[in-house]
Image (cartoon, rainbow, N blue to C red):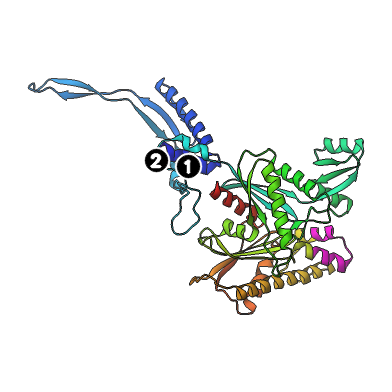
Amino acid sequence: MNKADLINEVAARTGLSKRAAARGINAALRVISTQVVAGQVITIKGLGSLKLRPKRRSLLPVAGKAEAKRTHATGNTVTLKLSRTAFRTIAEEPVKLYPQPRRIGGKITMAKEKDHDNNEAAASSDHNALGLDVGTSRLVLAGGAIDNVKTETELNAFITVPYSKFTENILKQNKIHYYQNGGTALQVYGNEAGRFANVFNIETRRPMMAGTLNPDEEQSMSVMEAIIQQLLKQPGKGESLRFSVPGPGRDGSAAADLVYHEAMLKKLLDTKGFNSKGVNEGLAVVFAELEKENFSGIGISCGGGMCNVALAFMSIPVMTFSINKAGDYIDRSVASVTGEGATRIRLIKEESLDLSHSPEDKFESALHIYYDDVILSLVESLRNALSDAKNMPGSEKPVPIVLSGGTAMPKGFLEKFQQAVERDKFPLAISEIRMARDPLTATARGCLIAALYDA
């Protein structure tokens, strides 16, 4: 491993740009070399101690004189004495070098980059990258390195409270996010809006409906901008940012809405200094979960407004679509037949619903019924889409299905989905059906991976 390799490793493990990693490594090396040459011993916890071994002098025979010898000076060397912790760590967990961006065997290839043995200037083209899941119910931001993704979530909702200076001061004191709307009202948005709604048993308002910007909500873009700003915190500096967009409906409906939705989000993110681009939500699940399968399989995101589906082979989307039966449909339907508010139904669904057990009250009974409806509609739509698809790539290997999203979270959802797939002959050979590692962040992680590969 040379210095350039070390910079690549540090950047991959920390999520830093190569330029930042190079600055840190150079500074550390300068300090170490200066102190070691001065005779200091550098002790690093978990690694060991570095010290200079002074010149040693060896004796060499003098030609023609049997007993005579002369001295020969050797160069100084720096020795590393590993600590017990370092020995134990190496024995228990061998060092793992992170693979270089260029992949072999048809996997996604990251943006090309010149190879340099020891050229830190190559880092100047690197950017940090971000992935943003723009969901009807929640927005999730993902950042960091591929192996160390960090996520942050905000509820995609708001409530309006009458303006008064007293109320505004209370919100400020409690560090609750809000903005003033024309001096007549205060808009409380994000996670705090959900807490307000639960306390006062009122319904939140939504900037989005059925997967796209809500046309009936005049505050939709203002609230979206406020929530996104809360997640991003600082303006961008040209970073690559990929955000999720839903697929077209099976009947081709709302195509114009999708174009408007994606264009408005891109404009918002670009004006904040990011290099943004939309990524299909189902395809993002494939990116997040199917690297070992060469990014081939079916990714499904069951969110609040839609269920999004993508079939991909070697990262290339072959088929994408969405259905508008999802979490909100379940909440509204159960609320309608039980006389309870949708917010209360949502709490029951997220906190205690178990689809693997028989329902215990009228709320759970209704939730079971409408969950069955969503699952059957989703599987039937997938079956029909596969049957109708033309020019499907030939593949001898069965492909996996990965489920994600908050609506897929209740216990028993996976089993019910599997039963629905196995009930009738399926048009495509399926190797397995599994849940994403973290269903709530899979789409954001997939968008981040797309951003990293494009950076």
- Measuring from the top left, give residue 375's x and y in whole percent: 70, 70
Q: Label 1, secondary structure: give it.
A: helix
**Neighbour class for label 2 at 10 Å: few (<14), some, many (≥20)?**
few
Residue occupying image coordinates x 80% and y 67%: 364
Instruction: Give residue 254's position: percent from left, percent from top.
Output: 74, 63
Instruction: Tell me the residue at 85%/39% (across/down).
Output: 171
- Residue 159 lies, with reference to residue 312, above or below; the image says above
Location of the N terminus (image quadrant)? top left
Query: At 69% from the left edge and 41% from the top edge, which residue is drawn?
Result: 272
Residue farthest to the bottom, as pictured? 424
**Is 94 displayed left or right of 383 in the figure?**
left
Residue type marked 1: Glu
Say which residue label 1 marks: 9
Q: State which region is magenta.
A: 330-346
Of residue 65 and residue 413, the one placed in the foreground of this image is: 413
Closer to the chain start, of discs 2 and 1, is 2
Compare residues 270 and 284 and report the one nearer the observer: 270
Give how far across and how far down residue 338 sits, in percent: 87, 67
CA gap, disc 2 to disc 1? 10 Å
Judge whether residue 65 can be spotted in this image: yes
Reading the image, the residue beneath label 2 is 1
Q: Are marks 2 and 1 in contact (CB under 8 Å)?
A: yes
Crowding around mark 1 (Cα neighbors within 10 Å: few <14, some 14 to 19, many 20+) is many
For badge 2, the amino acid type reads: Met
Q: Position of residue 244 (x, y in %)?
A: 66, 54
